[in-house]
Structure formats: C-alpha cells, structure tokens
Amino acid sequence: MRIKMQTKMKFRKILAVTVSAALVCGMLSGCMRKEEKAAEPADTQAEGEARLFSEGVDTVIEITGFKKYTGADAECFLKAGDKVAVISPSSLPTREQADATIRGLTEWGYVPVEGKYVCTVDRTLDNCREDLEWALSDPEIKAVFCVRGGYASCEVMEVADRKLITEARKPIIGFSDITACHSTWTRAGVPSIHASMSAAFTDLPKDCADTERNMLRGEIPTYKCAGSEYDRQGTAEGILIGGNLTIMTTVANTEYDSTKLDQPYILFLEDCECDYHQVHYSMTVLKNNGVLDHAAGIILGEWTDTDPMPGDYVGDSRGGKFSGVYDMIYRQFLKDLDVPVAYGFPAGHGGK
C-alpha cells in the first residue's frame, strides 16, 4: 500500500493508513521522619509531572473523507463475520483489556478468537510465538489484533517463523511496541495497520474509534492538519513505514528492518516518556544507518510526557536550549534534509 504526502507551512494533507500505552510513573524516597513520609513522595511526583510536556497532541486535524482501498492488497482488509485472532506478543495485558477487545471486535461485526496465552501470567517466549504462529496458520483467521503494547514483540519476531506472514497475508493491528511487528510485516510485503488496541474499545474518543473501524474495512481516511513552523514543504509518495522511534532502533539492520526496502518510503515516528538524550540517541541510530537520508518524506507524530530534565543533552552547547523535541530533531537532524517533513501529526500515545 502506498501513501502520498503533501506538507505546507499552514496546512498539510496526508493520505495514510495510520491513526494511532500504558504510562508508568515511579518515584524513590529516602529515609525520612515519619511526619514527612506522606508529603514528600506526593510533592516529588507532582514536581516530576509538572515538568513533563507533550508535543503534537493538540494538533488541529480534520478527516476530510474516506476512500475505499482497491489496490493489490485489498483482500487483506476485513469483512463482516471474519474471525480475528486476539493475542498479545508484547507485554502481558489484564483480563479486563482482553475482554474489552473481544467485546469491541464483536460489536464491530467480527468473530474474535482468543489465543491460548494472552493473559497467562507465567507465559514464556515460546508461548507468545505459539499464539502468533497459530493466528497466522489457521485459515479461518483473517487478521491479528493485539491487545496491548509494552515490550518484547521484537523478541517474538526473532523466533517466529516469518515465512508464515508472507504466506498468510493477514494484517496485524496495534502500535507502540507492535512497531516491531509492523516492520516485519512490511519486509514480508504484507500490509499492517498502525492503530489503537484495547483502548479503542475503552478510552478512545468515538470519532477516533470509528476511523479505526473504517480502516479495518479498507476505508482509508484523508486528513488535513494544522501546520508547524518546522514543516518543510513538498510532495512525496512511498510505502508508509515506522511507528515508535525507540522500537525502530531495536529492529535496525535485522532481517525485519522495514527501512531496508528497494522502493521509496515515508517514515512516521512517535514516542513517549523520553528525554532529549534518549530521542537524540535513537535519531542518531537512524541517521547513522542512512534511514533519514533514504526517506522520501518524514512525518513526526506525538511526543508525550517528555522529561526535559534527565540527562545532560538539553541544547546548552548546541546553540541554545532546545524548546522541545521537535526543535531538537529539526536542528540536529532534519534542518538540511531535502525532503518534505510534517511535524505534529496527532498519532501516537496521546488521548486521540
């Protein structure tokens, strides 16, 4: 599946298959007097949360229409009554998350079939591989819906029989850590859908959930977004790849690295709970592997709950403090790149 991308300084129009984690906060307190113990952790947590910021989550966006996909991979999309495997190749979901996914898919007109080890607390890597290979091998299953992200799908991609993906030609649905799966599917030449998981049936606003429901049926949305001061004008066409920036570094130079294509690609990136140092590190990995130079266009999504304090890479010795993640990425990586770049597309770990 190909997408076309056009960016302008005020508006940009993106034809894409992508729309859309658990956010974990921790704190450590030392030995204190009894009367101070209750107050200090709350204060520390409040201070930590106060300095976190997000970019791209408030981008004004309008869905201007839907177009039925009729390309070579049209058979990969779902029809009413299709059986959909419900698995979790990443972190262990709760029973509530799995049940919400099953109820939601049923309400959408599908027949969800749960894998054996979705919520098994002591499941092993082989158990996760078994669930995935079952979903791909069963001829009655038409798609693979992931319950949640988290971590470890890259491990599953390492041990799974990847030939089954090409043979089955079934889309996988998810985002965040599921980026490793998207990369594997792309290398296998099979479409996948970057979209919300169990949250589509619990926390996602109705218009977002409806858009995801349409995409599963092959009705592709056209978007119009507010622009950014960092946008670079231009038009590009290519295979849409990418997802979570951190996970993209874990698949770099593997047999399932989606950037190793023999055709143009448009790179989409987003991330959460990072500081400048972490983002810079991951972007450097992509840069040094030629990923940025070979992109026909780049779309930067949401950066949520960014912490500007940890680490020492804040821009002091790079021409002034960075005003945000977009500012840092623009100045350090994309300023002189001669391809269209769109900043702030509202997809990722935000609420919409």
Image: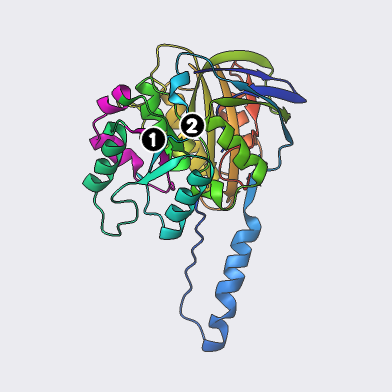
Q: Residues within 10 Å of mark 1 (few under 14, many from 20)?
A: many
Q: Position of residue 178 (x, y in %)?
A: 42, 39
Which residue is found at the position 44% from the left and 21% from the top? 75
Which residue is found at the position 69% from the left and 22% from the top? 13
| Residue 317 can be seen, yes or no | no
Left or right: 117 with respect to 37? Answer: left
Identity of the residue furthest to the front in this view: 81
- Residue type highlighted by circle 2: Ile
Q: Position of residue 316 (x, y in %)?
A: 61, 42
Above or below 99: residue 210: above
- Residue type highlighted by circle 1: Ala
Identity of the residue furthest to the right in this view: 10
Q: Residues within 10 Å of mark 2 (few under 14, many from 20)?
A: many
| Residue 40 colored in magenta in the image | no
Q: Position of residue 47 (x, y in %)?
A: 62, 64
Q: Which residues are magenta?
A: 140-167
Identity of the residue furthest to the bottom in this view: 34
Left or right: 132 with respect to 9? Answer: left
Above or below 244: residue 68: above
**Disc 1 secondary structure class:** helix
User: Which residue occupies the foreground of this view, 194 or 245?
Assistant: 194
| Residue 157 colored in magenta in the image | yes
Within the image, what quadrant is residue 17 found in? top right
Which residue is found at the position 64% from the left and 13% from the top? 235
Within the image, what quadrant is residue 246 found in? top left
**Disc 2 secondary structure class:** strand
Q: Quadrant of the C terminus?
A: top right
**Label disc, if present, on residue 180 of the rendered structure:** 1
Give the CA distance from mark 2 to mark 1: 12 Å
**Label disc, if present, on residue 193 of the rendered structure:** 2
Q: Position of residue 301 (x, y in %)?
A: 59, 35
Marks 2/1 in contact by CB < 8 Å: the verdict is no
